[in-house]
Every structure is written in structure tokens, then in C-alpha cells.
Image (cartoon, rainbow, N blue to C red):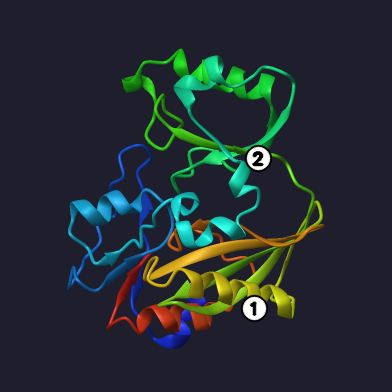
Amino acid sequence: MASALDRLEIPYTWQKVVPFVGELTPTPTINDPKDVVMFGSYTLWRYAKANDLEPGVFKIRPFVHEEPWQTFLLNGADALFLKLQDVPEKLPNDGKNWSLRPVEDSKEEPGTVKTTDEIIELANKVLALREHEIPKGSLRHDTELMFTEPVRILKEWRLWVVRDEIVTHSLYKEGSRVIYRHEIDDDALEFGKRLVQANPGYAPAYVIDICRTDDGLRMLETNCINAAGFYEADLLKLVSSIDEFSDIQIGS
């Protein structure tokens, strides 16, 4: 991203995020708090909010609750939702495999497949801690989790959406192989456009992950654009599209 910013002659600064605290070092010099975008850790939204920085971080709503996307979701209709504190009691311990992820775009637990034994063990470890002992950004007692049936995925792409337009994309997984290429199948790109059009105004800027399965194309999730990996996106297009919101100073 720094290379793209340099080429576009957009000013930026580098900061480190203090773990669990959310402060930045060194303290950034900000000329106009209404013209700042922050990229890096998801927790930057707290700093942006505390310092009234705008746009700051483009927060998003949980995609699983967005009605226009329900029919497009991977196993969305059959999903099971439980708070972590309810997992030991309500998740059947039958050795079944589940694909799980937090409902909120909080990065508390990456999307992954686990057995019920592993999930219950994870829940009990968290529940053994008192709330004040749990670091910020970690699974908590009241974290809502989404459980779905594992599905064989053939390809996965990330789409970057700015003002309801897909501005760039990247392949990031093919079968079980992590592979980054700036490419997308024509029908996958059209599918992504359908998703954006189905739910206009979801957020000023966000990321959609989609996939190809044996049963066709499906929506995996949305992510906060400020904390999503870039893979092989066209960063010149991405930075230009975000900069067009206004004369923005981008902090990283």
C-alpha cells in the first residue's frame, strides 16, 4: 500500500498499535481529523472513535443478519448460532465437524473447521477465565458464534467494494492451496456484482469473500476493508477509489 500511496502522492504516516491498549506509537500528527483513513489492525476503530477521526475505519454490520444476502450465503439457511458461554450445554458433543466463526467482524477467532470436542474444549478454556482476564480482541463469554456444515470449496476470491462498486479483486485460495493471483472467473465477478447490487449502502467501503463449490457460487463473508489482507489486489485502484471520498490523509 505504501508504494501505491507514494505513486499517487498521497501523504501517510506509520504507527505501531500498542497491544491490548490500542494507542499508537509514535502519536500521529493529524492536520484534519475529518480526513483520515486507517489501515492495519482491526482494533484501530477504537482509536478512530476515541479521537473522532473520519472516515477512520469503515465498520460493517454482521453479514449473516443482512436479509438481502440470505439466499447467497454458504449454508446460511442451516446455520446454528450460539454464544460461547452456551456452547458446552447446547452444542451436541457427537464428534461432528463444524465450520465456525464469530458473527461480528471482530477477528476473535479465524474461520475454521473443528470437531465438537475441540469447540467445547475451546469454550471451556475461555469460560475458565474471568471477563477481566480476557485480553481485548479475544473470544469472550458472550461472543456469538456461527456454526455451519463444512463444504468442499474449489476456489475463493476477495472483492474490494467502494461506494457500491467492485474496484479490485484477488484469488486467494484454490482447493486447499493458498495462492494469490490477480484474477477472477467471469461468472464469479458477475456474482459479486449481484451481491453488491442486492444490498446497496451496506457500508461505504468493505470486502466480500466469495467461493465456488460443487453446487455453485456462494458468499463466504464480509470483512472490514481496513483490516483485510490485500493478497493480489490492484492497490492503485483501491487507494484511488478510497481517496476519492475527499482529500484524505491515510495513516497506517
Numbered circle sitting on residue 112: 2
Which quarter of the rendered picture does the C terminus lie within? Answer: bottom left
- Specify whether residue 162 is in view: yes
Mark 1 secondary-structure assignment: helix
Q: Quadrant of residue 164?
A: bottom left
153 w.r.t. 114: above or below? below
**Residue 43 at x, y percent in the picture:** 37, 48
Instruction: Tell whether label 1 touches label 2 (CB within 8 Å).
Output: no
Observer-nearest of 18 and 106: 106
Query: Label 2: few (<14), some or many (≥20) within 10 Å?
Result: few
Q: Nearer the viewer, mark 2 or mark 1?
A: 1
| Relative to 95, 75 lies left or right | left
Q: What residue lies at 53% left-to-right and 21% top-to-bottom?
A: 87
In the foreground, 26 or 237: 237
- The amino acid marked with disc number 1 is Glu
Q: Looking at the picture, how far across and down is residue 125, in whole percent?
A: 52, 17
Residue 10: x and y in percent read: 36, 82
For image coordinates 17% across by 73% down, the residue present is 32
- Mark closest to the chain's N terminus, 2 or 1: 2
* Residue 170, image x, y percentages: 65, 71
Say few, some or many: other residues with alpha carbon within 10 Å of mark 1 (under 14 / 14 to 19 / 20 or more). few
Residue 39: quarter of image: bottom left
Pointer 1 residue = 190
Asked if 210 appears above or below 182 in the picture, the reply is: above
Secondary-structure class at tag 2: strand
- What residue appears at the point 28 percent right and 47 percent down from the top-left corner? 23
Q: CA distance from mark 2 to mark 1?
A: 27 Å
Specify the amino acid type for callout 2: Thr
Residue 173 visible in the snapshot: no
Q: Residue at x 58, y 42 (%)?
A: 110
